[in-house]
Amino acid sequence: MPGPLEQQLGKRRDEVGCLWAVLLDPDSLPPAELAQTARLVETAGADLLLVGGSSAGPGVFEAGMKAIREAAGIPVILFPGSYHQVVEGADGILFTSLLSGRNPQYLVEEQVKGATRALKAGIEPLPTAYLLIESGKATTVQIVSGTVPLDPEKTESVIDHALAAQFMGMRWVYLEAGSGAQRAVPPSLVTAVRDATSLSVICGGGLRTPEAAGERARAGASMIVTGNALEVRRDPEYLHAFATAIHNP
């Protein structure tokens, strides 16, 4: 059953049509800049912050998480690359299983190690299937996890994975092209998964423009995730354009 945070996100989604989440990586920015960025995107209209990365160690990650938490007035949700990144201060966690791959470490082992940590920290889990979609290059997620992404042209295979997640009790599915992707997840694939399942669809990776983000929102995503776009332009007008494109698509 959805907890208070998930219910809050659902209510906000009903209000704006599609949520805009900004991914912050404590391994990429120092704490002061993470805090500044959190305030910047919140002012621009972001609905929530995701905090995660593939390589940030416990000390670095905790310092970054603390800075973000103190700066943000919107929900802060962990998107951890390993159980070490399940730290105090977050409102929730995308409790993901990398169902597109067959590496047991990311199917279940990291989750077993992180479950009690999340419980003790009072972090609400959002049960999420993580499906890595081929994007034209080997992304960080692919390299770290040692898994092969799903072919976006093989729609039925992607739907099979999403349905398996639904039948296992998950409520969200993250269609991820990966950080620095050459090609984003096709809008048609977002629509296909949305129509074939009862899952809320998250879409991220390679969405470098407001137009690209808005197109996936119109295709049926419940949440759009941007990250690297901030490294290109960080002016308020550009960020506000993302909120406008994603909300009420």
Image: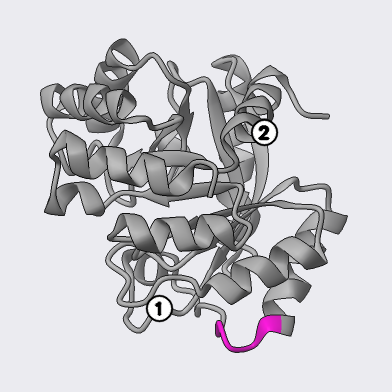
Residue 153 falls inside the magenta stretch: yes
Q: Position of residue 10 (x, y in %)?
A: 68, 31
Circle 1 packing at 10 Å, graded few (<14), some (14-19), many (20+), is many
Q: Position of residue 224 (x, y in %)?
A: 48, 50
Tell me if residue 239 comes above or below residue 100 in the rendering. above
Q: Position of residue 78 (x, y in %)?
A: 46, 34
Query: Could you tell me what secondary structure mostly forms the magenta stretch?
Result: loop
Callout 2: SS: helix
- Where the N terminus falls, by quadrant? top right
- The residues colored magenta run 151-155
Q: Which residue is mark 2?
A: 14
Cα distance, mark 1 to mark 2? Answer: 30 Å
Give, as a three-letter code, the residue at label 1: Ser
Q: How many marks?
A: 2
- Left or right of 102, for residue 51: left
- Left or right of 22, for residue 164: right
Q: Mark 1 or mark 2: which comes first in sequence? A: 2
Nearest-to-viewer mark from 1 and 2: 2
> Furthest-bottom residue in view?
153
- Asked if residue 69 can be seen in this view, the reply is yes
Q: Which residue is mark 1?
A: 135
> Furthest-right residue in view?
167
Give, as a three-letter code, the residue at label 2: Asp
Callout 1: SS: loop
